[in-house]
Image (tube, grey):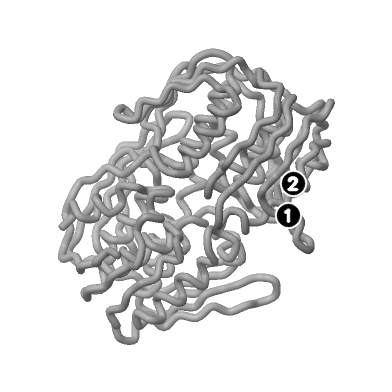
């Protein structure tokens, strides 16, 4: 259990951890490029270490310097030398399982790809179907019309390129298909109705891949990847968002966050907060394969707005935090298109509505058609309670931000789940006091 004491005016310059999404992809793509690649400023978290351990078990040469947060990868190229069956465990990392499966379907050895709870309850048909269309032999545990971990992947003689229309905006599904295209005969085209994170495409270009995007269609095909020698991972905007929200909500505060990734497909939360009236400046921009900059935030009174479904994919990880910001905003905040939150580590609509209601927030979740929306009408009367994390890292961290900004003493039942993505979260919070 952790006691959440209210903060009074924060004025500080901080650094947050490296980007989780980019760290995953740096490990995988470096493992597919012949030669040695040094990854600098690697995020050490339970999820990224799951990817690292899977690659080690496959036979990728990896040296990990935990103190320096560096990883050296020595790869033989697209095909791993292993021939016998391998048993892998993604633990609780959906990113590990989904995007690495796109690489594994192109290999010459069978794989049993297991997971732990709650990942064993998360849907995998979304990657199994398109990969199967490419000729892959990949099966999961079938329950009704869905498939779940563990996955079994068998080698096939040939993969073929396809044209695939994304039914839901998902960077993980898109990445799995892109990775499989590196082993496929012919061109693969992916149609995106709504934008999703493009870290995979950007990094593959850095490694020399021929990958194009035109009018919402990504084109990719067989490629030999070439190492750039070294990759620097910028700091994580999703992690920074907790402190962007905190500085906005705590009166008299000003926080500067250094070297944060500002990829346009990750700026959804920042852009929405600006529409709500937040004072956010992006300074000292630097261009690399991923742009990054310093972010300066000052406290401000937010106003409620309506957020459309098309805006959700660009801030999918920050939605629980957006519920918190909506609680402190003047007027009503309505957020549409939230069905994907129900199949995260926990049902994040339920976990956030349950906790915020108990704390005195006027909030409700509503089903409409085949989707979900949440309406927030501010705080009726703050009631200090024991928050329940539901073992979900983003739920837990968002609730801590609520407690810090609410002016009353709260507590939360579990903070160990934060190790999944942001192990330093509590120590960074404590440093602000």
Q: Is residue 219 above or below residue 313?
A: above
Instruction: In this rendered view, identify the residue nearer to me: 382 or 167.
Output: 382
Task: Out of 47 and 120, give the one closest to the viewer.
Answer: 120
Residue 330: percent from the left, percent from the top? 35, 78
Tag 2 and tag 1, C-beta contact below 8 Å: yes
Specify the quadrant of the image occupied by residue 186: top right
Q: Is residue 14 above or below residue 52?
A: below
Looking at the rendered image, the quarter that the N terminus falls into is: bottom left
The residue drawn where x is 32% and y is 38% is: 259
- The residue closer to the viewer here, 140 or 130, is 140
Position of residue 412 measured from the top left corner of the image (x, y, whole percent) = 32, 68
Residue 147's label in the rendered image is: 1
Which residue is identified by label 2? 128
Snapshot quadrant of residue 275: bottom left
Which secondary structure, mark 1? strand
User: Is 305 on the left or on the right of 170, as rendered?
Assistant: left
Indicate which label's residue lies in the foreground, 2 or 1: 1
């Amino acid at each position: 259990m952790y006691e959440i004491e209210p903060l009074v005016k924060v004025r500080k310059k901080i650094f947050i951890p490296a980007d989780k999404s980019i760290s995953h992809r740096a490990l995988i793509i470096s493992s597919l490029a012949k030669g040695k690649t040094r990854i600098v400023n690697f995020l050490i978290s339970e999820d990224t270490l799951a990817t690292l351990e899977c690659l080690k078990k496959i036979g990728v040469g990896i040296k990990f310097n935990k103190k320096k947060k560096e990883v050296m990868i020595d790869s033989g190229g697209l095909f791993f030398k292993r021939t016998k069956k391998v048993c892998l465990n993604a633990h609780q990392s959906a990113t590990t399982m989904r995007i690495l499966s796109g690489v594994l379907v192109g290999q010459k050895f069978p794989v049993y790809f297991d997971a732990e709870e709650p990942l064993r309850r998360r849907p995998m048909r979304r990657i199994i179907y398109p990969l199967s269309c490419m000729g892959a032999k990949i099966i999961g545990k079938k329950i009704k019309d869905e498939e779940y971990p563990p996955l079994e992947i068998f080698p096939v003689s040939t993969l073929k390129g396809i044209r695939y229309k994304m039914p839901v905006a998902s960077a993980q599904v898109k990445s799995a298909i892109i990775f499989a295209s590196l082993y496929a005969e012919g061109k693969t085209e992916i149609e995106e109705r709504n934008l999703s994170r493009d870290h995979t495409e950007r990094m593959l270009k850095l490694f020399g891949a021929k990958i194009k995007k035109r009018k919402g269609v990504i084109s990719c095909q067989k490629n030999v990847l070439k190492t750039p020698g070294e990759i620097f991972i910028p700091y994580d905007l999703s992690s920074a968002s907790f402190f962007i929200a905190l500085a906005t909500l705590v009166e008299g505060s000003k926080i500067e966050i250094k070297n944060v990734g500002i990829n346009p497909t990750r700026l959804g939360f920042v852009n929405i907060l600006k529409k709500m009236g937040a004072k956010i400046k992006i300074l000292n921009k630097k261009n690399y394969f991923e742009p990054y900059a310093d972010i300066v935030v000052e406290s401000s009174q937010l106003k409620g707005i309506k957020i459309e479904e098309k805006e959700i994919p660009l801030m999918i990880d920050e939605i629980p935090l957006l519920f918190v910001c909506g609680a402190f905003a003047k007027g009503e905040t309505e957020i549409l298109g939230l069905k994907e939150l129900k199949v995260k580590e926990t049902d994040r609509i339920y976990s956030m509505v349950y906790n915020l209601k108990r704390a005195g927030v006027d909030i409700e979740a509503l089903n409409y058609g085949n989707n979900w929306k949440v309406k927030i009408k501010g705080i009726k009367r703050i009631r200090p309670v024991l928050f329940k994390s539901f073992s979900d890292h983003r739920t837990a961290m968002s609730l801590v931000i609520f407690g810090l900004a609410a002016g009353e003493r709260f507590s939360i039942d579990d903070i160990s789940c934060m190790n999944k993505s942001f192990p330093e979260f509590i120590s960074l919070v404590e440093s602000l006091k």
